[in-house]
Every structure is written in structure tokens, then in C-alpha cells.
Amino acid sequence: RANPLDLFIPITLARKKVILVGDHKQLPQLVDQNILEQMESSNDTLEGFEQLKTFMESSLFESLWNYLKTERNDGIDRTVTLDTQYRMPQKLSDFISRNFYGDEAHIQTGKDSKDCIHHVSRYTKKNGECKCAVWENVDSKESGKISKTNEEEAKLIIKRLQEIIKETDESIGVIASYSAQTRLIDKMAQSDAELKKKIDCKLLAIGTIDAFQGRQFDI
């Protein structure tokens, strides 16, 4: 990851070309809500605020992408979309393609469907088809001010992990949005002898979204 200030120096030193790699569809600009509220209160008109809000929510990468894609009519392609992924099942890939990219690009799947077979009975249909994603509702509230925890969610995750490791030796990744939640789950997992073995053998990892960037697990 890099912010504009990190990029300015290498961009100015480039002799022939600059190659920026990113994805403004899945990783949009993050804007502090407090800043937006201050901007709204200091603007005289709603129209003025909306213009500033649109500007703030557009990253440098997105601005350059749109400029090079639509405003440079010299016949030279300066933007490229990678359209094949090799990390997830077709159903998940289609969901991401449809909801993030729409008509702009259809993301193909280069992963063999046989590589998406798991051996967890809870997440296998009666016809033998493996479910690639499951939603489990936890009726409880988060606690904490900045980094939040949800104890009931953590307990359910531990319960599911205990079930899964009885059926498979596949690698498992547990991802949570808050570091406090990952610490809670890890503490619970470390207190279970079998789960601790999986952690020690690198077959079970617990971390935040940022910590898992570039990593891959079977489940």
C-alpha cells in the first residue's frame, strides 16, 4: 500500500514510464467520517459539500485511472484490467465480478473446480456439492470503543474450528475486522489443546484483514 506522498518522489524520478498497480473498485478511498462532518458544517450549500465529498472519496489512483482511460484520446491503451483470478471458486468470483465491477469487466476463474473440494460435512450439500460460503448469524452485540470484540461470535468460531479439524487437515484462516477480536479468538484457541497444535503447525492462523493480505488457506 502507498499514499500519494509515498508515490510522488518515484514518479518524478521515472525516466520513461510509471506503472501503478491497484484496485479502486475493491479498495476505495477511506475518508474519516469526522472530517466529512466538519466539511458539511463549514459549507454554505449542500451542492458545495457534495462536490467536496466526491473529491475526497476519489483516490489518486482512481483519478489517474479515469483520466487515462477516458480523456486521453490518442489511441494508446494506458489502463489494463487483470481479468482472471486463481484463488477462489467460480461462485465467489462471479459474486465479486458482479457486485464490484458490473459491466466494466467480467472476472474469469482460472482455478480448477476440483481444487475447491473440501471435506467438512457441515458445509457439504446432500448431493455432495461443497458449499463455498456460509452465513452464520450471531445474535449478540460488539463491545469496545475503537477495536471491538464479540465474545459470542468468538465462541461460535471456536466451536466450528473444533468441528472442522476433526474432519480435515486442510489449512484454516480465521479473519476478523478488529485486532481485539483476533486476540480474543486466538486466546480461546490457544486454550484448546487440539487447536493450539494446529496453530503451532501453521495449519491454523488468526488475524486481521490487513495481516492476511497475500496469504492463502484451504478454508
Image (tube, rainbow, N blue to C red):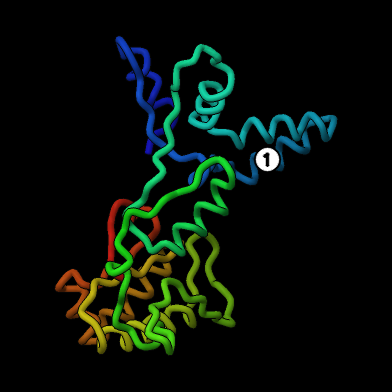
Name, please, the residue furthest toward the left.
201
Say which quarter of the image contains residue 4.
top left
User: SS for tag 1?
Assistant: helix
Quarter of the image for the C terminus: give it: bottom left
Q: What's the residue at 43%, 85% (across, down)?
A: 125
Relative to 22, is 161 above or below? Answer: below
- The three-letter code of the residue at mark 1 reads Leu
Q: Pointer 1: what residue?
A: 36
Instruction: State which quarter of the image contains the N terminus.
Output: top left
Instruction: Name the residue rendered at 76%, 38% in the picture.
Output: 40
Q: 19 or 111: which is nearer to us?
A: 111
Q: Quadrant of residue 35?
A: top right
**Vertical placement of residue 189 versus 104, above or below:** below
Query: Who's the residue at 43% across and 89% down the image?
Result: 126
Foreground of the two, 206 or 102: 102
Q: Residues within 10 Å of mark 1 (few under 14, many from 20)?
A: some
Question: Residue 179 in the image: x percent, y percent?
Answer: 40, 62
